[in-house]
Amino acid sequence: MKLVRFNEGRWGVLEGRTIQETEGPAGATTGRTFALEEVRLRAPATPGAIVCVGRNYLDHIREMGHDFGKDLPQEPGLFLKAPNALADPDARVAYPSWTKELHYEGELALVIGKPLRNVSEEAALEHVLGYTCALDLTARDKQRTDLQWTRAKSADGFCPLGPWLETALDPQAVTLRTRVNGTVRQEASTRQMIFPVARVLSYISTFMTLRPGDVVLTGTPEGVGPLRPGDEVVVEIEGIGALRTQIVEEAR
């Protein structure tokens, strides 16, 4: 089932090209319907927290210059994006003037449906409302130089999410692709994750309560790289759909 957030925060179930409006995410239907082409899709989450996993694919660890033997993580390495970074499907995200290295990172994301605290791996996925595509935009030069990653990861629009949530998905059995201007730059199976989604959620829940609407990004595979104004980035995940983002010149 595909759950859609649209217009001014309405929710619905997507059936073909028609949205059946619901009372909140996965709620009862209201009887109203909307054509997909006639609505504005919104990021399918209202997070208080966006928790992200770094270095969750071996090939990405290698391309970032880390040594497998010395730098292979023993537990998920986490960082946060601020809620202001959230952006809708088909967003136009400005290339900030303060960075020279804006990079794309395509990722599988999930949205929490039930509060998550001290939950086992076996029960963790029961707390997921659905899965979606994410673009973790990163100011790579500022990631290297700033004391914390706040500017590098949490600038306005640095977390496009969508186009909707898929509830019937095995998060460890899908292929992720990132295209820039139509060219495939990233392609990997989520089977290649070092830390599976259930383990990531269980780990987070040992020290932090995740609440309905919160978002978790599960890491990016090999192939990250630079962007420039005018580029279109498409993150596509098997069984979900495609998230499109346009990088534009910053307004002066």
Image: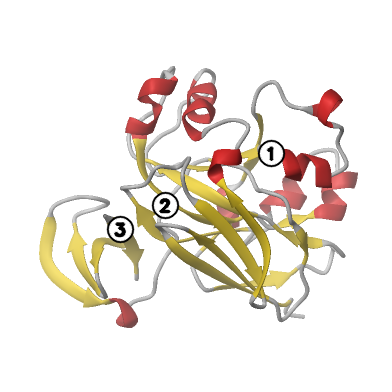
Name the image quarter holding the N terminus.
bottom left
Q: Any mark on residue 2, and which?
A: 3
* Residue 36 falls in image quadrant: bottom left
* Residue 76 falls in image quadrant: top right
Q: Residue at x 66, y 37 (%)?
A: 56
Of the numbered discs 3 and 1, the one sitting upstream in the chain is: 3
Name the image quarter holding the C terminus.
bottom right
Q: Badge 2: how crowded within 10 Å, few (<14), some, or many (20+)?
A: many
Label 2 sits on a secondary structure element that is loop
The CA span between labels 2 and 1 is 21 Å
Question: What amino acid is at disc 2?
Answer: Ala
Q: Nearer the viewer, mark 2 or mark 3?
A: 3
Q: Report if the CB atoms under discs 3 and 1 are less than 8 Å apart.
A: no
Q: Residue at x 67, y 55 (%)?
A: 105
* Residue 91 falls in image quadrant: bottom right
Q: Nearer the viewer, residue 132 or 222?
A: 222
Which residue position is annotated with label 1? 54
Q: Nearer the viewer, residue 84 or 188?
A: 188
Q: Nearer the viewer, mark 2 or mark 1?
A: 1
Q: Badge 1: how crowded within 10 Å, few (<14), some, or many (20+)?
A: some
Label 1 sits on a secondary structure element that is strand
Which residue position is annotated with label 2? 45
Q: Report if the CB atoms under discs 2 and 3 are less than 8 Å apart.
A: no
Q: Position of residue 208 (x, y in %)?
A: 52, 24
The CA span between labels 2 and 3 is 13 Å
